[in-house]
Each structure stands twice: as C-alpha cells, then as structure tokens.
Image (cartoon, rainbow, N blue to C red):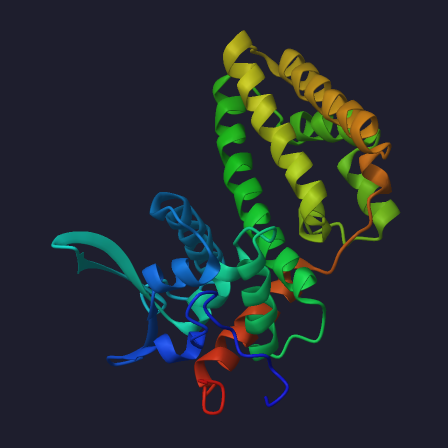
Amino acid sequence: MADIEVFHFDETKESFENHSNENGFTYWSARKLMECLGYLNWNTFNQVISKAMTTCNTLNIPIMGNFEARMIELNGKLIPDFKLSRFACYLVSMNGNIKMPQVAKAQAYFAALAGAVQDYQIEAEKVERLQIRGEVSERESTLSGVAFSAGVKNYAFFQNAGYMGMYNKNIKQLKLVRRIDEKRSLLDFMGKDELAANLFRITQTELKIRNENVSGQSRLESAAHTVGRQVRQAMIDINNITPEQLPIHDDIKQVKKELKEKNKALKSFKSKGLNK
C-alpha cells in the first residue's frame, strides 16, 4: 500500500485517515467527509449519501452496519450527521460529482484501497451503473402496475412494443444479437448510458399513459412504441448513435460480486502508514 497517495483535506492538508473515529467500529463523520469532498451544502451532500445507501442496499449489504444516522451539536444547534464506515465513504465518493476535484481524488484513493486495477473513473461508472440498474427495476415495477390498471392483458407484448420502438428489435431478437442468455435480462448487460436511456423511456411511457388516459392492450402497446421511437430519435439526434449500437457490458452480477469483495477488503484494511 506504500504507493497509494494519501487523501488530504484541501485546506488543512490533514489525512482523511486522521479523521477516523473508534466506537465499536472505525467510522468517519459524514460532515467531515462532506468537507473533504468539497461539498458546501448538506442537503446536496445528503442526496449523495442516499444514493450510496441505495447502492449498499442493492448489494444486500446491511445499511445499518455502514451508515448510522445521528445528531451532533454545532454552534449550539443539533444537526444531522452519519457515522460512515470506510466502505460507506467509498460508496459516497463513488456516487459523488466527478467534476469536483476532491471527489476525483477521493475516488482514486478509495479505488486504490479497494484493490481496483482499472481506472478509478471506470470504478465509479460501475457503481453508477448499479445505481441506475436499481432505479430501472423500480420504475419497471411501477410501469407494470400502471399498465395493468390501464388494461394490459399481455405485459410481454406491451414491453416488447417499447423495445421495438427504441431498438427496432424485440427483446428476443436483441438477446440473440447480443448473445445474452434468454433467461437473463437485457438490462443486466447494459452500460450506464443505455440504462439511463431506458429509464427515461420507462418513466416517459408511464407519464404518457397517465396524462393521456391511455387504456386497452392495443393503445398501450402503441404508446410504449411511440415513446421508445422518440427516445431512439433523440439518441440519434444528440449523439448520432442508435441504441442497438451501444456495447454490451460485464454482467451486473459480476459487478455486484466485485463490490461485495471491496466491502470485505475495506473492512479488513488497516490505515497504518497512511495517516500522515
């Protein structure tokens, strides 16, 4: 670990490791981490923490063992804070705004501690990909409820209509082209940009159904196809690429496995030699 650059606070030049606390487990104050990463507003930073907690939950890793809510006193007032484990600090950093210099430094630092061999930006993208994949699952569930309430009898046909509009191929055809097992979800092999595009398609399909009071199998399929077609055209207009041209990515199950291994690695990590 001697080649890992110590992560410092900008102004104090104190090591991040020096701000750890011991009380049953090693933890850092979220307020201190906020300062460390260059965030100025708690509400904004709390949104990053919420994303990190969602990622933790998606991995089936206990939130309570990594994010412990508490109140602390500052200038005579009680304010919210969290006790964050090292893994929680890692997840928060990976969910942070990469355009902020301190976030980029933190991502590189934690990726190195976790034994990442790839570029830290790729590491952060994997965490973001997992985050969006979870959001897609949630919104798909919501859309299915809305669709059934509106009269969908065959959800597979309705779902295929959305894919046909966006990809010019149905789900089965896409799996064949991408060589994905028919029992697996296409979403598990999409990168974050493609997942985000599908998230937009799903949310906008739901919105269209609600706003236009679309009902009945045929009309609902038409609505799903129309939204998919519009998302497709937007991708072509903005980036001159069709969604079916986007590359497939590693199985999301492998990403989850890697992140769980990082949790174990960071749990057993000792900061000796890095707290300067």
Q: What residue is shown at x 53% (from left), y 30% (from top)?
A: 144
Residue 247: image location, x then y, percent? 82, 49
Res. 173 visible in picture: no
Find residue 232 and report its horizontal and vertical position in percent.
78, 27
Residue 46 seen in render: yes
Query: Residue 274: x, y in percent?
Result: 49, 86
Quadrant location of the N terminus in the rendered image: bottom right
Q: Residue at x 41, y 54 (%)?
A: 49
Give whichever of 31, 61 is nearer the camera.
31
Residue extending furthest toward the left = 76
Decide if residue 57 is on the left or right side of residue 143.
left
Residue 173, compared with residue 108, is above or below; it is above
Q: Tell me if residue 29 comes above or below residue 193 in the rendering.
A: below
Q: Looking at the picture, how far across and down is residue 72, in whole percent?
A: 19, 60
Give the left or right position of residue 113, taking residue 169 as reference. left
Seen from this angle, which residue lies furthest top?
212
**Eyeballing the image, is 125 above or below 194?**
below
The residue lying toward the viewer, choosing from 216 and 75, is: 75
Of 204 and 4, the residue lying toward us: 4
Compared across the picture, whether 71 is left or right of 228 comes to: left
Place residue 12 in its image quadrant.
bottom left
Which residue lies at the image location 79% right of the left edge and 29% below the top edge?
Answer: 238
**Residue at horizontal 61%, vertical 50%?**
99
